[in-house]
Image: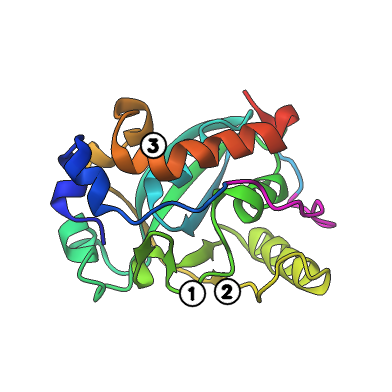
Amino acid sequence: MKTAAVLIAFGAAAGAALMAPAAAEKAVIIPAARVDVPATPGLQTAVLAGGCFWGMEAVFEQVRGVRTVTAGYAGGTAATARYDTVSTETTRHAEAIRITFDPRQVSYATLLRVYFSVAHDPTQVDGQRPDSGPSYRSAIFPQSPEQARVARAYIAQLSGARAFPRPIATRMESGGFYPAEAYHQNFFDRHPDHPYIVMWDKPKVAAFRAAFPTLRR
């Protein structure tokens, strides 16, 4: 879990409390999905978990066709969907984001491609560096049977192609989504100099912009 000091401190002391970042941040080149959810009039919703929701939110806010991204908690119950409680790692929640998107501009499978390629590392189990614990797990929460079918097919496709050096650990889960506290929303944009954002999330956003120029806003 991120401590309170990491959440609110912006000086060198907070930066020193964090582990050193990976030597380089870059997208994993993976094929597009062979199957997709058909585009329909109106907006669709996706719920994805992949480590700290600050970075996940920041990446998907860059994607053309995405209307809104909300940081929150997926799974578990509404009664315990609070950061201090989720951080105890006893509530079964995952830090997640809810994406509202226009499927005529960006498809569900394209969002999954960004998710697996650059938004997080789908091979890490119960954590995303530098955070550890099941609330930072890799998980997809399909919002329809079609989304579930496409997600399962894409995981099988990527696994068959050996797209990653280790097995994909992403879980398929069900459960509600509960928006996180206001101070977590748009954290990347509101606190661009926060040590965690600088060390972990800015490189991730830069990697997305380099790897997917046609998807950028």
Q: Quick one: label 3, few (<14), some, or many (20+) residues within 10 Å?
A: some
Left or right relative to 127: residue 214:
right
For residue 169, which numbered disc appears in the image?
2
Q: Amino acid at mark 2?
A: Ala
Which residue is found at the position 21% from the left and 38% from the top? 12
Who is closer to the viewer here, 78 or 86? 86
Residue 199 quadrant: top left
> Gap between marks 2 and 3, in whole Å?
27 Å
Rendered location of residue 151, percent (x, y): 67, 63
Which element type, helix, strand or loop, lies under badge 3? helix
Q: Position of residue 205 (x, y in %)?
A: 53, 36
The image quarter in which residue 193 lies = top left
Determine the secondary structure under disc 2: loop
Q: Position of residue 69 (x, y in %)?
A: 45, 38
Residue under the point 43% across and 60% down:
129
Relative vertical location of residue 30 with respect to residue 60 in this rendering, above or below: below
Dot 2 alpha-carbon crowd within 10 angstroms: few under 14, some 14 to 19, many 20 or more? some
Residue located beneath label 3 in the image: 198
Residue displayed at 69% across by 60% down? 146
Name the amino acid type tagged 1. Val
N-terminal of the two: label 3 or label 1? 1
Marks 3 and 1, how far apart in space? 24 Å
Q: Which residues are magenta?
A: 25-37
Q: Residue at x 39, y 49 (%)?
A: 53
Q: Earlier in the sequence, mark 2 or mark 3?
A: 2
Is residue 21 or residue 45 the one in the foreground? 21
Q: Is residue 27 magenta?
A: yes
Q: Which residue is mark 1?
A: 125
Q: Residues within 10 Å of mark 1 (few under 14, many from 20)?
A: some
